[in-house]
């Protein structure tokens, strides 16, 4: 493996740990935590022959939902499959845009998705209470401002302030491309608070989107530290770990 030095007697676990440390800036924090602290966004089982086909279907559903309801603020799409139907869960900041009057838009979306994949679709919509803490929505907001020729530094600063005011522990925004219309592409980032990318207990949300400008596409990456996951340690062990070794002295007057 390029860039890795395997010491005599070192096992594969040491090699993996070393590669994760060196690649901490490049690993998608959601994929890094999936299966450990996070669940999968697609929850179904299929035989090996059907797996690729169903995976492409999931991608079509996600792409269609994001494209059709660009202004609904869809942060993520989760898919569950049974033998009879496909359950699509949309997490949106503005669910009213998807629902429409008397639920007409939902029925239309359901029919369109059924014709797209050829299976029965069941749609469920979940409202996002605080969009400023969702990395994908923050990235989309930054990209929209950049498309309107807003100053990238001012846009980054405003988005970071809004996110920290919403209760985030930290945020990092990174832009790449011809920033400010410059001839040479470059990369700029700003960090506020703490972003512990290699700490698995840290709840790091990640979002990426491309901003389409007159000079070319700009890549927008956002990392948001939403705090820590709930510790699923046995209560007795947790209390024992927090107990003080020496009792405090009580002074009586």
Image: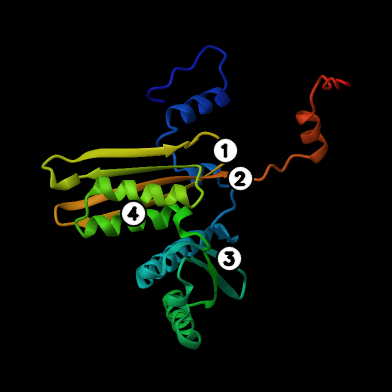
Judging by the rendered image, the residue that carries numbered circle 2 is: 37
The residue carrying pointer 2 sits among few (fewer than 14), some (14 to 19) or many (20 or more) residues within 10 Å by Cα, namely some
Label at residue 200: 1
> Residue, x 34% and y 50% (percent of image)?
158
Picture coordinates of residue 238 (x, y %)?
A: 77, 35
Q: Tell me, yes or no, whether the two marked residues, 1 and 2, touch with CB atoms within 8 Å.
A: yes
**How far is the residue under mark 1 from the one under mark 3?**
25 Å
- Residue in the foreground of this view, choosing between 147 and 250: 250
User: Do residues under tags 3 and 2 come within 8 Å of each other at their CB atoms?
Assistant: no
Quadrant (top left/top right/bottom left/bottom right) for the N terminus? top left
Q: Which residue is mark 4?
A: 209
- What is the secondary structure assignment of the residue under circle 4? strand
- The residue beneath circle 3 is 80
Q: Earlier in the sequence, mark 1 or mark 2?
A: 2
Left or right of residue 127: residue 4: left
Q: Residue furthest top?
A: 8
Quadrant of the rendered image containing residue 11: top right
């Amino acid at each position: 493996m390029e860039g890795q030095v395997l010491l005599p007697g070192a096992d594969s676990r040491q090699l993996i740990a070393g590669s994760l440390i060196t690649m901490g800036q490049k690993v998608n924090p959601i994929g890094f935590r999936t299966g450990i602290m996070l669940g999968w966004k697609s929850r179904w089982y299929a035989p090996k022959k059907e797996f690729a086909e169903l995976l492409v279907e999931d991608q079509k559903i996600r792409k269609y939902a994001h494209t059709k309801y660009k202004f609904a603020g869809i942060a993520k799409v989760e898919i569950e499959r049974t033998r009879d139907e496909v359950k699509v869960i949309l997490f949106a900041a503005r669910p009213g845009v998807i629902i429409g009057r008397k639920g007409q838009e939902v029925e239309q979306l359901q029919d369109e998705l059924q014709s797209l994949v050829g299976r029965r679709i069941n749609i469920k919509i979940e409202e996002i209470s605080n969009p400023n803490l969702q990395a994908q929505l923050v990235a989309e907001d930054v990209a929209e401002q950049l498309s309107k020729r807003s100053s990238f530094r001012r846009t980054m600063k405003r988005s970071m302030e809004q996110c920290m005011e919403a209760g985030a522990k930290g945020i990092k925004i990174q832009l790449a491309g011809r920033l400010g219309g410059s001839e040479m592409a470059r990369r700029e980032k700003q960090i506020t608070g703490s972003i512990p990318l290699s700490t698995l207990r840290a709840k790091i949300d990640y979002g990426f989107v491309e901003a389409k400008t007159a000079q070319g596409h700009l890549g927008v990456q956002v990392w948001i530290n939403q705090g820590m996951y709930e510790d699923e340690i046995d209560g007795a062990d947790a209390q024992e770990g927090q107990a003080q070794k020496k009792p405090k002295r009580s002074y009586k007057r």
